[in-house]
Structures are given as C-alpha cells and as structure tokens.
Amino acid sequence: MQAITGYHRPSGLDEALALLNRDYVTSVVVGGGTVIGAGSLETEAEAVDIQACVEASIEASPTRIRYGAMVRLQDLINHPATPPLLAETARREGPNTLRNAATIGGTVASAHWESELVAALLVHDACVKIALPDHVVEVSLEELLGDSSLAERGIITSISADPSGETASARSGRTPADTSIVAALGRVVASGVRLGLTGVAAHPVVIDPADVESLEPPGDFRGTPEYRKELAGTLTTRIVDLLGGTA
Amino acid sequence: MKVTFTLNGTEQTFDCRPHESLRAVLRGEGYYSVRFGAETGETGAAAVLCDGRLISAEIMLAAQADGHEIETVEGLNPPRGLHPIQEAFVETGAIQSGYSTPAMILAAKALIDGNPDPTEDDVRDALSGILDRETGYLRPVHAVLRAAAILRGEKVAPVEPALIEPLVEPGGTPDMGAANSPLNLPPLSPRVIPSPEVPETNVVGKPERKVDAVKLAKGHAAFVDDIERRGMLYAKMLYSPHAHARIMSIDDSAARALPGVHAVLHHENVERVRYASGGQSYPNPLPYDQVSFDNKVRHVGDRVAAVAAESIEIAEQAVKLINVEYEVLPAVFDENEAIAGNAPVIHDEPDMEGAHDAARNIVQHIEAEVGDFVAGLESADRVFEKSFRVHQVQQCPIEPHIAIAWLDSDERLVIRTSTQVPFHVRRMVAPLLGMPVRDIRIVKPRIGGGFGVKQEMLIEDVVGHLALATGRPVRLELNREEEFVSSRTRHPQTITFTTGVMNDGTLVAQKMRTVGNTGPYGTHALTVQMVSGLRGLSTYNCPNKKFDCDVAYTNTPVAGAYRGYGAPQALFALEAHMEDIATEMGMDVLEFRRKNWTKVGDPLDVAAELGEGAADMKFIPVVTSSGMDECVVQGQRAVGWHRRHELDWLQPADRPHIRRGLGFAMCMHGSAISGLDMGGASIKINDDGSFNLLIGATDLGTGADTILAQMAAEVLGVPTADVVVYAADTDMTPFDVGAYASSTTYVSGMAVKKAAEEVRRQIITRAALLLDVDVPGDIELKERAAFAPDGRSMSLEQIALHTLHQDDQHQIMATASYVAPDSPPPYAAQFAEVEVDIETGQVTVERLVMAVDCGVPINPLTSAGQVEGGMVQALGYGHCEEMVLDETGRMVNARFGPYKIYRADEMPAIEAYLVQTMEKSGPFGAKAIAEIPKDGVAPAIRNAIFNATGVPIDNLPFTPQRVWDALQTS
C-alpha cells in the first residue's frame, strides 16, 4: 500500500469529485478498500475515501432494487429483497472478511472478468448511476462494461437491477468456493433466457445463448481458450435446460 | 496524519501515514494478536472486528478506520483465565500453532453476537476468511458451535474419545457385517479403537489441554515478530527477475546513499562460503552448492542482495535502487529435459562441491537393489509399467519465514527465528558468519506452522550478516510471494513403476525409476528421494526390488522438505499403480493389496539401503506392530465402501452428468530416522513439586510440547499442568535435531521418558528416606505425592522443599537423550469419496476418511487434529494446489486464491480414526503420526475418480481441465 501518498475523506460528492479531478495529482477512489488495500496500485496516488459521501442504503420496489454504491456485499446478501441470484453470486465474490468490506460499487468498477456478481447484475438488467464533475448519468451496466470511459473522472453512486424472473446458475471451478473458471447465469425474460457468462472475455458478458459458439475466450493456467469455450457451451445448455428451455 | 477510532472500547488517537494498514498501526501499538499472513489479506490472520464485522486489517487503511469501532482479541481477554469462546477452542483441540486463532475467535464473537444459535454452515461461512493449514477446520467449527451453546447457557459434554470396538479379531478376519453398519459419532470426539495390549495410564492417552493454549487463545506475544528491539532495522531482499543469469555488475551506490540505509550486502562484499541449506544432522549431505550471495542467479526469486534500513519502506526503496547488470542465460524447468545432456548447465562454478554430475545437471544418482529385479521380472506371470508425474506445491505456513537478529551485551549473536531446527541452524550459520558456534544463540518461540519449509537455514544468515554489519537488531520477514518463490517447495518427480506379478496376485519384482526436480539447489535432494524410494518399495512385500533415481537441477523455485518428505509423491504413484494392476487382473483392490502389504514380522529390507541412517544400520528392520487390517475395515465402514459397485449410487439418476466414486490408498511412513535422530530433555523439580521440562524439540503447533509434558507427567505422577515446558533455545535447552522425520513423539518422547525416570528415581530415593521405606522401588508416585506401600505419603512439594532447603541439599534433576535404533512404521488406510462432472471435469471431494495406526496416541485430541489437518493439506496437494510457472520461470499464481487453498466453507466431510497398537520400542507404545496423513489423499482421490469414470489420471493435481482432458482422451 506504499503507493498511497495521501488520504481524503470528503463529506460530499462535489468535494470528492473535485479531489478526484485535481490537476497534477493522481487520485483513486477507495470504497471498501479491498482492491486498493491489497496493493493493486502500481503508481503513487492519493486515496479519496467515499465512505462519508456515497450511499450505503438499499431501496426495493416491485420493479427495481437499488443499491447505494457503498453497500457492502454482505449487506446485499442479507437484504430480504435481494434477488437470489445476486445474493448467491455476491457470496461467491469471496470469504466473509472480503464481503464485509467490499462494496457493490467497487465490484462493478473493477468488473473482474471472473466476477459472478457482475455477470448476475448484467443478467438482472442492471443500471449504474455515475456522478461526474458537472452532471449525473445513468447507463446500463452492459454499456458501461463496453465503454469504461463513461465512468472516468466520476464516482459510481448506485446500481439498480430488475429483481424479477426465475434464475439459475452453473459453474466449474477447482473447489466448491473457488472463483469459477467459467460461470453461466441465466434469468427468464420475455424474450427467453438472458444469459451472463464469466471467464470468457475481458469482463463478464451478457450474450444470446445461440451465440455462445462465437466466443473467443482468453486463456490462463486454469483453463485454455478451448476449454473455456467448451465450458461456456456446456454450462449454457444447463442453464437453458434448468430454465425450461426458454432460450 | 492522525486517526481516531474506538479500540476495544476506548477512543484513541494514533499517528499513521496514509499508506499504512490498520494491521501495521495496531501491531505498532502492541496488539500482537493481529498477525501478518499475506499483504493481500486472504489469510485472515490479521482479522479484526470493525463495527462488529470481521475484516482483514492487512488491507484496510488505518485511515479508513477513523471514526469506527475496532476490536481485537485483546479486548475480549479477561485479566486471568479465558473467555468462553477461547475456552471452547482450547477444550476442543481447535488450536494448533495458534497463529490465526485470535482471528478465528473474533470471527466466532461476531457471529454469535448476531446469531446466538448458528448452524454449522453459518460457522463455516464466518470462518471462511481465515485460512488454516493446520486443523482442517473441523475442530474450530465445532469450537464455535460449542461456544455458542455455552453462551446460550446450555451444558456441554466434555470432549472425550469415542471408544470403538475393533472389527478385526487378533489374528482373525474382519467382521464385514459390522463394517457395513455406519456409526453415528459426535464430530469432536477423537475416534479411538483401543488395543487390549495397551496398559492403563493416568495422563498419557488422555485428551489433555495444550500447554501453550492460554497464550495462543489470548493472542499474547508468542511468535518471532511479537517483540520489539530498540533501534531495530528492517531488511528487504533483492531477488532475481531471471530464471538463469550471470551477474555482470552490481552497483549499490544509490541504495547506500539513500538516507536511512545502513547496509547493502551482495556477492561483492560477503565472503563466499559453500554450504547446503537443509536443516540436517552433521555432516550435512552433499552437495554444498549455495553461498549467501552468488554472482549467478538460478531461478526467479533467487537471492541477489540484501538491505537493512530504518524502515521497511526505505529498505524497499533501496532495493529498487540497486542496479544489477545481468547476462541472461538459457533456462530449463523440466527435470527430464534438464538431465538429457543438452540442457544449460546450472552449476558451472569451479568451487561447487558434491554434485553427482554437475555438467549434466544431475545432483544425485541413487541406486538400490534387493534380490534380483531382472530375474524376478522374468519369472512373473504378468508385467505392468506406468509413469506418473507429481507437481510442485508450497508448504504455505500462514506465518512466513521471519527472523530477528541482534548482538547481546556480550556481543554474542542472538537469532530469534521461525525454525524447525534451531540447533542445526546454529551449527550451519556459524561458518557463514565467521563466528564460533559458542557465540551464537538461536531462539525458537512459537511457530506459525512449518510443514518442513522451516527445516532449513533459509534467512538466518542474512539477518546475521546484516546485524553484524550494522551492529543493530535486524528483522527480515518474507512476504507471501517471496515465501512462494524464494523459500522451499515440494519436489516434483517423474516416477515410473515396473512390477512383475504372479497370477495369484503375488508381487515378485518391482522397480521404481524416479527423476526428481530439486530446482537449482540440492537441499534435501538426496534424502527426499531416498525416502521416496523407501516408501515406494517397502510398503509391499516383494523379493526383488530396485530403486533407480536421478535428481535434476533445474531453474524452478527450490525444492526442499515438505511434510511427508518424498512419501506423498511415491505413494501417489505406487497406490495408483497398485489400483491399476488389481483392476487389470480382475482382483479386488483391497484384497490384492492385503495379500502383499507388509505385516508384523516382515522385513523392511530396502530400508537397509535407503534409510537416511542406512550407513549406521547394522540390521534389517522388521515390522513390529501394525494395525493395517483394522484401519482398512474401520475406514470401509466410515466411508460406505459397499457402495463402490452400486450402479444407482455411482450414476445418480437425477444428475446425468455426475459420476460418483470411492477410492482407497494404503499409507506407511516412518517414526524418525533410525540411527541418526537424537533428542535431549532436561527435567528439574521446583519448590512446590512442579517440574521444568527443557527440550530442544520444536513444537510447530503440532502439540509436541504438550505430549512431551504428558509423558513426563505420567512418569512423575503429576498432572500435565505441573510440567512447565520451555523449548527451544540453544543456550538453555538440550540438543534436539528438531521437528522433522516424524521424530518428536518417538525420539524426543523417549528422551523425556528417560529423563523423567531418572528424576523419579531421585524422588523416590529421597521419599524412601523420609518415609522410612527400605526399598525405594516400592514407592509409588501419583497424585503429586510419593506413596509408601502401607499408604503413608509425602507430597512432592514436601520432598522438593526438603531436598532443596533442609537436608543433604541438592537439585533433583536429570538430563537424558535418546537416539532411536528403529523407525517403526505407522500404517494408515485412506479413503476418498468424489463426484466427477463428466461434462466439465470438475471433481468434488465429498468425504475423506483416514484410519491411522500410530501406536498409542499420547493425546487423542492433538493426534486427531494432526490427521484431520494433514488430510486437508494433502487434499490441496491432490486436488487444487499447484505452483504455475510461465515460460520464463516466473510463478503466475503466487497469491492465495489463484494458488488455491481450501476454506472452511467448502470442506468435504473429514473423519479420523486412531487404531491403537502397542509399539514396544516407542514411548508408552507410541509411533509417529505427523506426516502419514499427507500420504494417501491424492492416490485415494485418483482411485475414486477411476472408480467413478473408469479413467485413470496419472498427473497431479486433479483440476477441472486436467480431468476433462483425460476424459476426452479416453
């Protein structure tokens, strides 16, 4: 953590954005701190801790559930209105020491390619609200993952999702709690199954089940591109079957 | 900057820097229970409560804690005694090294505070953030459940062994009817199958509390890092970025010029003294292929330079300022390629000592033969041959290597270090530092796990050099990546078995060809491979055996000692091979093995060729005790072996992509290195009739101090609590080779027993005088007193006071040592139950059962914990742990997570059974237990996958893609 050269805890979003957008000073947003604290910084930067200026509340309605970006993953899991797939995948983000600290905003901002929670949010049609220096935007998570510049110089303030629909999940990993090599997550929507996959691209993707064959996954020591592609096909078939073949 | 938070109920303000972690600040304030495990936070050793939630203080900025409530275990500690959660951890045997115990206790508190009646799943989730290499999680989980019950006001039963009827009559056949009826036993009770040959004892054989439990449960200062030395400097190492390179020049001027830097050491300013780093008896086995700092680097992570500075941050900065010019050389990583004759030569230096053929990268060549293998093979009805590959893994103690060195007021060098071998370290480090042994003192406090990786003189020379160079105390701690790539690992091997079998299943010839991969240094290269040969060729009877082994230098991270020491590799190959032979011959896999396994009276003939102490071995050892038959049937019952051929169970109808299987592996290990391992013990009486027991033996968390105290207490007629243990300190305690080779119970235990018996003799002599008894031998020691035959008694306190103060004063005391002529093998039956997803290759291990014959378990609680924890570590070896190097030799997964260690919330069911036998050569009938749990899990899983899918997989570990690839190929 030596790369952190300064620490700020702004009390409001405007102050936070101002700190984040200073000239000649590199700043990083610290939410739960599990990414920055674990030494991911390669260059010196000042920390802008948003715990005092970004919401940590959860609001649920029949059509949307909205999480403040500072909602800890464990609080998301514990909330009775959280859809089962979001709770299940949030649990799979890591052990309880991590879930007690990590936030949904940080998880979305990191968008790790193996994050099942991010994939589940995609499946639940998540939208992300981002505070920028001069305005606020709300974009779909899918759009944000496709163009990360949308959040540049900004702070994610909330994530909302459509809680409806039957869901299912399937995955493969080395052990039961291992980060999945590939995971497939699905939700029944009007048009069929909305499918999310991890471990097949630079970030989790939502994809038409019929298009899985066209994937060209990257590889690593846990799975070659060919194996990951096979897994994606197999697990997709399972999800579609589990959800009643509604692809 | 200043931060203010409520710490254990009191608001306090601390100075900190923006980058400092909460752990660093808390430790700086003396909260030693918050311990380092990994800078990325995955171990949970530094877990604290923040606003009642368990978080890792390693990755939380101290500044983030401002305004919050922080709790450490120090806030839970009563002034004397234990909190109920701590008490539950002690009673259940949930504490081994205790390094991460405070974190677990906080996890329990957080859980129970919010949920007074948690389920087992709740507890496992609560502990999921704290990695444990020692207990297998079973006892910590049930400790939390027990604590919750106590805090709810419920009465809980004491944790007593569950005594189980034997299923095998002496000399008879197993009762297979009973073997098919599962038992329903409380999960915490050590399962003991008693032997009628074992005499009654008062202290030995009882589930005593660990003698070091209080300080471990309360998080007191106990480990290497839990001291402060005025003026301490911090060391960091510069490691090689290349797998193989020559250092053409090294410029340390910028580093030396950095304010706060006190020393920079490298090959140009440290004397070149050859050594072998393995912590072994004198003379250390060849080769002597290391120096403190060399002009060549031979693996990514090899030493280049060391810096001592006023802070870790300055030392890290200085390391970056050292300018090294390398000539990068070709590298080789595969053991077979390395010795093929055209590989880069890894040791081309002229002063290299003792490699077999350095020009061909062959560090050792070992051959041994009993009978005539070729003739035996020719006589066989059938011949089977198969090759296996076992991989590289790391021991991963949660406490990494750490050492602190300073000069005392006599200008002697004191090194406080996390080591398994303090006496070996003292002897080995002396010539490197140019000091006589008498001027060096090694202190071993509590150790946060070792598993063999600390059977090494690894960093003590560095802190020694730096302390001498600066005159200041110097501390060096490896970070997690350094622990992976710059300490020691398990030897990868390529193993080929060739076996001749008669049609009735009798083995008549067996050859084991091994190519071991030691990395670039041959520490333990000879002896690990010898143990591989010994275990591979002495588990089963066979008249004609041959061992043919080359050990290769490569440019991988260095291999060394790891719990099991060559046996897990050998037994994976052997037990896979035996399974395949039985299957191909249409024989029952257990009956085939039973026909051939060594039994009481059978010679271990290859031990005379391959035993580490073979040079001193004057006879062929013979098996003197074995509970193998009983182990197998107890394991069969526990795992439900009868399901192995039930199609409905093997192929569950509701999950067509799942196949189930059961696997077995036989295990046989040793108890110490006969003729070589020696332990010493010293006992003296105190005024109140208590005793001090001083031992050089090294408790790594295994409970060695406790079981040695139990043995002394048994002889002296006192409770274990009356024996105060001190270990190990080269100035204060007798010599002991240290903790390795499963020797502590068997060898150090016998030394303690001998010393206690001499102290007992002195006590009863004085008691006979005072009680006017003619024959001292008629005096009995029990209940802290000496009893005359007529029932009169005198307390040990009275005897001690009389002897120390009143008449013919002298100190009742004795010192004894013991070197074992034998190494009686413990035996074990390992079973595994798996599910295989045949579409993805994912293997899920559902259950592990091990039944162990360890002679008489001195403490069933700690013995069961050894088996449970060992099995889980072995599960990682077989299933998910692997060090992965890229094409340049850099490890790509040097972090927990990518390097996968099992968590509490994903464990299979585990059960340990302790099958008693009376090993007459051991103290109170004991044999070893520490290492055998590592031996059988990988082959049992492999054989279970074979049972499930019909596909034999001969490479470890059984990761999804490896299994999927094998299924596709088949």
Image: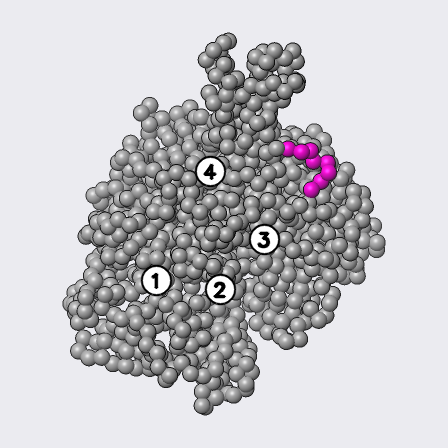
Please tell me whether the stretch drawn in magenta is mainly helix, strand or loop: loop
Residue occupying the far bottom of the picture: A191
What is the distance, in whole Å, between disc 3 and disc 1 at their CAs?
Answer: 33 Å
Asked if residue B866 lies in the magenta stretch, the reply is no
The residue carrying mark 3 is B187
Identify the mark nearer the N-term, 1 or 2.
1
Q: Compared with residue B618, is residue B578 higher up or lower down, i.e. above or below?
A: below
Cα distance, mark 1 to mark 2?
19 Å
Q: Amino acid at mark 3?
A: Pro
Q: Residue drawn 65% across and 55% down? A: B184
Element at label 4: loop
Q: Chain of mark 4?
A: B
**Labelled disc at residue A178:** 2
Q: Are discs 3 and 1 less than 8 Å apart at CB? A: no
Is mark 4 in CB contact (under 8 Å) with mark 3?
no
User: CA separation, marks 4 and 3?
Assistant: 24 Å
Which amino acid is tagged 4?
Asp
Q: Which residue is mark 1?
A: A101
Q: Are marks 1 and 4 on the same chain?
A: no
For the residue marked with disc 1, what is the amino acid?
Ala
Mark 3 vs mark 1: tell me if same chain: no
Please determine whether, in this image, residue B162 is positioned above or below residue B619.
below
Q: Do the residues bearing badges 3 and 2 touch, measured as CB atoms within 8 Å?
A: no
- Mark 1 residue element: loop
Image check: B718 left or right of A86? right
Magenta segment, which residues?
A: B194-201
Q: Amino acid at mark 2?
A: Asp
Up the image or down, B827 lies above or below A211; here it is above
Which residue in the protein does label 4 denote? B212
Callout in the foreground (2, 4): 4
Residue B230 rendering spot, x and y as whole percentages:
27, 35
The answer to whether any part of residue B389 appears in the image is no
